[in-house]
């Protein structure tokens, strides 16, 4: 239950992170470099700061929840065998092979 909830939150945060990264201006130049002068004239610096902080926040959320999901991962009980393992062991039991001869 908790694992499913954490997984859903990680997926939502990841999709939001993708959107936040795509909305940011490129700092390496390219096609966006010609529009950077206009953005600074129009006062978009605070929007850039907000997007950068939102990106770092979302990265931290994804990392922390991904690590936390490992603690809530559903596990089998220590003494219980899976059905597949039980079937494989019963088919390869050497005692049953000796009786068949």
Image: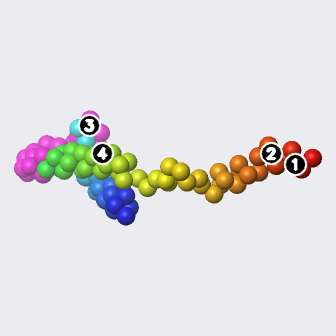
Give the CA separation, mark 4 to mark 2.
Answer: 50 Å
Label count reads 4
SS of the residue at dot 3? loop
Q: Which residue is mark 4?
A: 63
Q: Which residue is mark 1?
A: 99
**Residue 35 belongs to magenta span:** yes
Q: Residue at x 71, y 50 (%)?
A: 88
Query: Is 76 in front, or is 28?
Result: 76
Q: Give how far apart the Cα atoms at labels 1 and 2 are.
A: 6 Å
Q: Which residues are magenta?
A: 28-49
Label ID, residue 95: 2
Pinpoint residue 95: horizontal percent, then vertical percent.
80, 45
N-terminal-most mark, 2 or 3: 3
Numbered mark located on residue 29 in the image? 3
Question: CA separation, marks 2 and 3?
Answer: 72 Å
Q: Mark 4, mark 2: which one is toward the viewer? A: 2
Q: Estimate the spatial distance between the alpha carbons at disc 1 and disc 4, rounded to whole Å.
A: 55 Å
Task: Please state if 8 lies on the left or on the right of 20 as rendered.
Answer: right
Q: Secondary structure at mark 1?
A: helix
Image coords of residue 93 (percent x, y) = 76, 46
């Amino acid at each position: 239950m908790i694992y499913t909830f954490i997984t859903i939150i990680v997926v939502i945060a990841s999709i939001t992170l993708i959107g936040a990264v795509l909305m940011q201006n490129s700092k390496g130049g390219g096609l966006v470099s010609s529009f950077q002068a206009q953005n600074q004239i129009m006062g978009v610096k605070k929007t850039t700061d907000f997007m950068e902080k939102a990106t770092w926040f979302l990265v931290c959320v994804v990392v922390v929840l991904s690590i936390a999901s490992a603690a809530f991962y559903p596990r089998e009980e220590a003494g219980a065998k899976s059905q597949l393992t039980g079937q494989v062991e019963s088919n390869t039991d050497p005692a049953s092979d000796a009786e068949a001869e």
